[in-house]
Image (cartoon, helix red, strand yellow):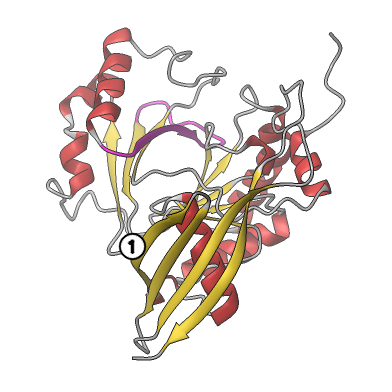
Amino acid sequence: MGLNPFFCSELSRGVAEKTFGTASIGQVWILLEYPFAWGSHALNDSNLSLPIKRHLKRTLRSIPHAKLLFIKQERARLSQRSLFVVRCRESKPFIQRFTLDDYSQLTEIDLAAVASGKLSTDENIFSDPLFLVCTHGRRDKCCAKFGYPLYKTLRESTRQAVWQSSHVGGDRFAANLLCFPHGLFYAHVTEAIGRVILKEYEEKRITLQNYRGRACYSNPVQAAEFFVRTESGIREIAELHRLFSAHVAEESWQVRFLEATTGNVHTVLVSRVMSDFQNLITCHATEAHSVPQFRLDSYEVLEP
């Protein structure tokens, strides 16, 4: 077979695929600095010892909704590695950072306790925002083609912590940008849009352009949040709190959000439908498929 003549990210943009409601779901994110080449499956293909790989896999199984990503920056420090544990949630999300002299130290850290906040110490709290750009080209060539230039631009134009990351889900949405600790996902991020997203996030606001959703929400709730913010104009991250969500029909959900300042309750009914278009959804795909898209069926605001 010859080389694939397409990029799945360009195909997605070409049909104006809706990106909201597509963020990977994860309430705990373990980010391990691994400044070497990443294989298609980052952990399995790494040179970490078998006991450490087993330890990390056991840890992921023991923490509900936990994800592991490898991260790196342009110039690797030779002596130490960073480990971040991120707890994504509506209220008081946090990041804890550890410095490893050797990967064997991973077995000495109770990551489940860290993720729950039981091992929180001031010296480990990472108070600045953390930004990840997926550049995992061995997984999908779009992540390298679109992700790496975005990473380079953001690293050079901001003082914030920007890292490359392994596969975050959604190859066709490259370049993918993640904002922690809230776990905001963005798709098809250009260098100009990326700078706007970072600036707005530093000011604790959500940018709706290219938004995929929050990692702490299910996909239907992610779409519901997008519709509420679009209809209401609310951009402050902390201003909306999910009150209720219910699966009311086979492909429909009702979701309610409380607006913190006014006490207003925003209620939406959203449905999931399959797209009219069909696309190759990764650069390795050989068959085109429809993709799920969310639709707003109703929206109302109840004042207190």
- Quick check: 249 above or below 225? above
According to the picture, the residue beneath numbered tag 1 turns out to be 90
| Residue that sits furthest to the left in the current view | 118
User: Per the image, is 70 magenta?
Assistant: yes
- Quick check: 245 above or below 25? below
Q: Quadrant of the C terminus?
A: bottom left
Horizontally, is 277 left or right of 96 in the view?
right
Q: Residue 68 falls in which quadrant of the image?
A: top left
Q: Position of residue 91 (x, y in %)?
A: 28, 64
Can residue 160 be seen here? no
Q: Residue 294 falls in which quadrant of the image?
A: bottom right
Residue type, mark 1 in image: Glu
Q: Residue at x 57, y 36 (%)?
A: 74
Q: Position of residue 169 (x, y in %)?
A: 55, 37
Q: Position of residue 52 (x, y in %)?
A: 28, 16
Q: Position of residue 202 (x, y in %)?
A: 48, 67
Q: Which residues are magenta?
A: 64-80
Horizontally, is 5 left or right of 101 in the view?
right
Front residue (pair 10, 19) = 19
- Quick check: 226 above or below 118? below
Q: Quadrant of the N terminus?
A: top right
Q: Residue at x 66, y 39 (%)?
A: 148
Dot 1 alpha-carbon crowd within 10 angstroms: few under 14, some 14 to 19, many 20 or more: some
- Quick check: 152 above or below 179? above
Q: Residue at x 18, y 31 (%)?
A: 109
Secondary element type, mark 1: loop
User: Per the image, is 10 magenta?
Assistant: no
Q: How many marks do you count on the picture?
A: 1
Q: Residue at x 84, y 17 (%)?
A: 3
